[in-house]
Image: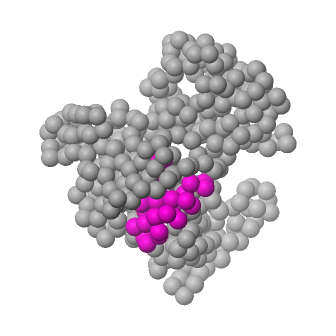
Amino acid sequence: MADISVRGRLALRAAAAASWASQKAGRGKGSMIGGLIALRIDPTIMTQLGRGRRTVLITGTNGKSTTTRMTTAALGALGPVATQADGANMDAGIVAALSAHRTALAAIEVDELHLPHVSDALDPAAVVLLNLSRDQLDRVGEINMIERKLRAGMARHPDAVLIANCDDVLITSIAYDHPHVVWVAAGSGWAADATSCPRSGEPIVWEGAHWRSTGADFQRPEPDWWVDEGFLYGPDGLKLPLHLALPGRANRGNAAQAVAAAVALGAEPERAADAAATVREIAGRYRSVQVGEHTARLLLAKNPAGWQEALSMIDPAATGLVIAVNGQVPDGEDLSWLWDVRFEHFEGTQVVAAGERATDLAVRLTYAGVDHTTVADPLRAIASCPPGRVEVLANYTAFRDLNRDLEATR
């Protein structure tokens, strides 16, 4: 703790005491309360904890937690890596992670709104920019405004290497003028929030995988890294097998960016790819659990782009699909986004609408022409499906509450 000021040491001791008390009181791990107290006592503690570290920041609307886990694994060959175990990606969670692990390397998940000031505090060696799409408008705001803030934030860190998804128009705009960019073709399954150029306002034209602005000198860069169904490709003719434990094309793109970030910090590509491929579960996502006569696989989605990607992972051979939707503050209380998601392609699968807002979802499914039943309680919804394998897709608090209820039944 040689680089920590006296006030900073006091802040960390108080944080540790608060975390211990929270754990003893049965209120969780206590990392968030510890981080909040540390910041209240010394607002510069994040900067102090970041000194002397080589830090990779990971941000985007979707895939942050998964890519952070993959980046942590890929960096592991270089030494121990500080990271968040619980996905707490705002200031208090970041401080808690950095104070718990005094390592020379860090892979830190960051909420996109917090990226500019967290970058200022930690002076990252690299920043992974995944994707940018509409999320909770009541909290996040309009997406073009976020793009401009992130672009200005990254401009303040010209020495950082940006690992940027060139298939995402808004992410490309953030990184386009930066002096150190590694472009990754990580895919973009959702283009509804980037139909116009973020720099000129004119339309974006897509020609296959390539896109360009009709009103500015702005177009998809040539990627340094890209993936297909079996391999990861990189600079100088690099070609590596990539067999992920996690499903979905989006996770292949996440892995490509994680490996590119680790290589930018000096990791061997082969070892980084092998390590990233071992990630199997992130805070309960993608895991399968036995629920009576059913094997339920749990998937999480939080916004239209995430829902569309998660729906593409649904196994059509499953005996049932439970879709659980809440509308609490962490989810966003406005569920009008349900009408942006394509639910129309479920034939032959028994679909059950569940969650606190099951009736809102049921209306959307009706208009989509999806035969379904409505069972508000997700556990009972699973039980209502025919015996066998059930896919469960839930938004944030519905997913959290279902995991809590599953633990209570054990």
Q: Residue at x 65, y 77 (%)?
A: 13
* Residue 260 among those drawn in magenta: yes
Q: Is residue 125 left or right of residue 350?
A: left
Q: Please state the extent of the stretch shown in magenta in the rendering.
A: 252-279
* Residue 36 figure quarter: bottom right
**Between residues 393 and 348, which one lies in front from this camera angle?**
348
Q: Residue at x 82, y 28 (%)?
A: 293
Vertical comparison of 93 with 280: above or below: below
Relative side of 178 to 341, left or right: left
Q: Main secondary structure of the magenta part?
A: helix
Q: Is residue 302 visible?
A: no
Residue 262, above or below 248: below
The scheme the figure's colours follow is one colour
**Quadrant position of residue 346:** top right
Q: Quadrant of residue 82?
A: bottom right
Residue 102 can be seen, yes or no: yes
Q: Quadrant of the N terminus?
A: bottom right
Identify the residue at image location x=45%, y=36%.
305
Depth check: 405 or 10 in front?
Answer: 405
- Asked if residue 107 lies left or right of residue 37, the reply is left
User: Residue at the location (66% across, 38% down)?
Assistant: 298
Q: Which residue is at the front of the view, 329 or 281? A: 281
**Placement of the C terminus among the 4 image quadrants:** top right
